[in-house]
């Protein structure tokens, strides 16, 4: 590449001499004093950076340091020798989980299938609910009434998983008589949705109803809190857009379809990509607190499979790490694929 003087110098017709390009002078000054500007910014906003420290520590200790233990899925298991000193075993754990054909491999494939189905149902039914709630909040004109509804929908998110699962268990609890059934089970029996035998046995003891209860409780717990992002995007829409739609004769439904939804489409796409990224990350806490031996067929997921085989019973940490590794790799591929599709279809992407 040939460098010319005109790339850095500008000819001044008045003096008949070359002088340095003012834009280049600014760029050189910025590059020369870059770290000085960074230091001044940090000193100026040191309170904000101080608030960032706890989050960085959480990610460091709970996200990055545990990656060291992922080496165990490629190492020969030896609890005495550190992971770094163990012998390399290749992909033997992955081969056993995927192609062994024994009971452990079949349990893994069942857990992977349950994870995908549970997450897919959560994406289909759980993702639209925060958007619907945000649209509902936007139509409530009274600030007091809207605040009450928002607090009521946000509240379950601040309850612990143990409390949420205990409430679900109490609402559908099993018993020997109708009076000992939970209020939800009694209502479903009276409506004819389930039989009394199913209500007496307990919905949480029936594998056919576990996924439904899991998704409904998940929507109850997180829909209100997740609607904050969409409601913030809705209230940022300019009032002139609504006024223009009203002049054109658009009613509420038309305004929602042609004004609100297109305006928050970018937010929906970004949130959808992040949701797809965590599609297979079904938390084991809630599943473990709800499932039992009779519902393993539909309730067992990869995280509970890894916990059961890596810590609880057999203590095969290599197999558990391999299962979680495959789960995370599939999640990463889903993020890349969904981001690429979104970028090509809507010109909006996460990166």
Image (cartoon, grey):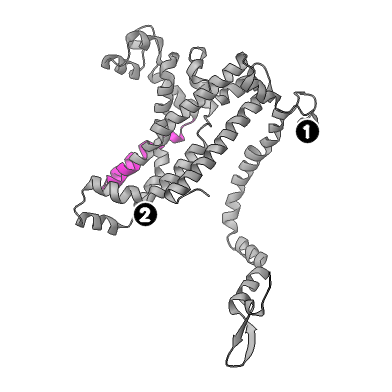
Q: Nearer the viewer, residue 271 or 198?
A: 271
Q: Nearer the viewer, residue 159 or 266?
A: 266
Residue 248, image x and y in percent? 20, 55
Q: Disc 2 or 1, which lies upstream in sequence?
A: 1
Q: State whether the magenta stretch is mostly helix, strand or loop.
A: helix
Quadrant of residue 189 in the image? top left
119 on left or right of 12: left
Disc 1 element: helix
Q: Nearer the viewer, residue 39 or 106?
A: 106
Residue holding disc 1: 84
Residue 92, image x and y in percent? 70, 24
167 on left or right of 253: right
Is any part of residue 33 visible from this angle?
no
- Spatial CA span between label 2 and label 1: 52 Å
Residue holding disc 2: 236
Magenta span includes 39? no
Is any part of residue 49 visible from this angle?
yes
Part of the protein shown in magenta? 133-160
Residue 212, image x and y in percent? 40, 23
């Amino acid at each position: 590449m040939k460098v010319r003087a005109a790339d850095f110098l500008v000819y001044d017709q008045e003096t008949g001499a070359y002088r340095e390009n003012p834009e280049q002078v600014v760029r050189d000054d910025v590059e020369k004093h870059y770290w000085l500007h960074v230091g001044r910014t940090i000193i100026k906003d040191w309170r904000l950076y101080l608030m960032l420290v706890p989050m960085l520590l959480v990610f460091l200790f709970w996200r990055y340091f545990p990656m060291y233990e992922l080496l165990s899925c490629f190492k020969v298991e030896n609890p005495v020798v550190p992971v770094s000193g163990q012998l390399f075993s290749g992909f033997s754990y992955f081969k056993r989980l995927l192609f062994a054909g024994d009971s452990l491999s079949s349990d893994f494939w069942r857990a992977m299938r349950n994870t995908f189905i549970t997450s897919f149902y959560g994406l289909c039914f759980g993702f639209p609910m925060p958007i619907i709630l945000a649209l509902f909040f936007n139509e409530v004109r009274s600030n007091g009434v809207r605040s009450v509804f928002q607090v009521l929908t946000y509240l379950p998110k601040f309850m612990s998983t143990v409390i949420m699962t205990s409430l679900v268990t109490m609402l559908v609890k099993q018993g020997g008589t109708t009076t000992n059934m939970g209020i939800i089970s009694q209502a479903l029996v009276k409506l004819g949705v389930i039989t009394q035998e199913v209500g007496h046995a307990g919905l949480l003891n029936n594998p056919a109803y576990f996924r439904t209860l899991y998704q409904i409780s998940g929507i109850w717990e997180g829909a209100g809190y997740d609607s904050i992002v969409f409601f913030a995007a809705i209230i940022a829409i300019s009032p002139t857009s609504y006024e223009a739609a009203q002049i054109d004769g658009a009613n509420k439904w038309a305004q929602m379809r042609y004004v609100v939804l297109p305006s928050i489409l970018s937010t929906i796409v970004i949130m959808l990509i992040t949701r797809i990224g965590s599609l297979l990350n079904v938390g084991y806490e809630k599943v473990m607190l709800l499932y039992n031996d009779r519902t393993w067929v539909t309730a067992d997921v990869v995280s509970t499979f890894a916990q059961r085989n890596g810590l609880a019973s057999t203590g095969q940490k290599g197999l558990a790490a391999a299962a979680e590794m495959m789960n995370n790799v599939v999640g990463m591929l889903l993020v890349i694929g969904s981001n690429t599709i979104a970028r090509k279809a809507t010109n909006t992407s996460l990166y």
